[in-house]
Image: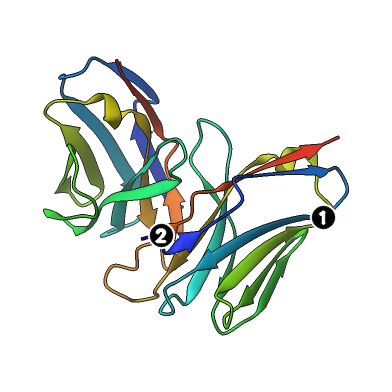
Amino acid sequence: DQQVKQNSPSLSVQEGRISILNCDYTNSMFDYFLWYKKYPAEGPTFLISISSIKDKNEDGRFTVFLNKSAKHLSLHIVPSQPGDSAVYFCAASVYGGSQGNLIFGKGTKLSVKP
Amino acid sequence: SQTIHQWPATLVQPVGSPLSLECTVEGTSNPNLYWYRQAAGRGLQLLFYSVGIGQISSEVPQNLSASRPQDRQFILSSKKLLLSDSGFYLCAWRGRMRAFFGQGTRLTVV
């Protein structure tokens, strides 16, 4: 049973436009959410996170929105740049719970076209 | 600052051969350590985690095992590789909130 779902395997966006990456979760105990960016043959790198006590967190061109009632979060990238082309993973965890393991979605491959 | 080392970067192994992937962490003590695998269409799947020396928890039944002989060392092993073990293996350690990943090992079983 997938606890973290990224239903879009890929997304293509024009440079300068907004990229919106979506993520849904099923475990209502999750209280911390992260986005990671991954280039081929490299380890994922942390991008941005949000705690369940917030509904929005912004860092430069990246904003994460959390809708707890819908168990949904999204990552907005504005403006999108060709260097943003990568696979983006959504992750969730229960802070302090058992081992605090991060559960990842399957990822969304973003392609930003010049 | 904390760094995580993982090697080798790529590995091609025949079916039935053994496997040993090593991961070490610097700059932190008593880290929570993880092995993930990225297989095609399956995202990042948690394989093992360890909260201390000799303490290993497995998330999914499989042909692999893990060991933690030292505080900052985490090893992924197999006695006999299967074709289905091919994938991109990632070691990670968990800081206060976020996880930090190594560069990964591309394993191809032929």
Residue B65 location in percent, x, y? 16, 41
With B62 as the anchor, is B42 left or right in this view? right
Residue A80 location in percent, x, y? 80, 48
In front: B39, or B31? B39
Residue type at numbered disc 1: Ile
Bin the neighbour count of mark 1 within 10 Å (Cα to Cα): few under 14, some 14-19, many 20 and up.
Answer: some
- Occupied quadrant, residue B108: top left
In front: B29, or A63? A63
- Occupied quadrant, residue B97: bottom left
In this orientation, does residue B98 appear? no
Residue shown at the point (37%, 48%) measured from the top left:
B45
* Labels in figure, total: 2
With A17 as the anchor, is B98 left or right in this view? left
Of the image marks 1 and 2, the number of the one nearer the N terminus? 2
With A42 as the anchor, is A27 left or right in this view? left
**Residue occupied by mark 2:** A2
Residue shown at the point (57%, 83%) measured from the top left:
A69
**Residue occupied by mark 1:** A18
- Does the residue at mark 1 contact the one at mark 2 (Cβ under 8 Å)? no
In this orientation, does residue B56 appear? yes
- Occupied quadrant, residue A26: bottom left
Q: Which mark is residue B92?
A: none
| Rendered view: B49 above or below B67 | below
Residue type at numbered disc 2: Gln
**Tag 2 secondary structure:** loop
Q: CA distance from mark 1 to mark 2?
A: 28 Å
Residue shown at the point (44%, 79%) measured from the top left:
A28
Residue A73 location in percent, x, y? 61, 69
| Rendered view: A70 above or below A63 | below
**Tag 1 secondary structure:** loop
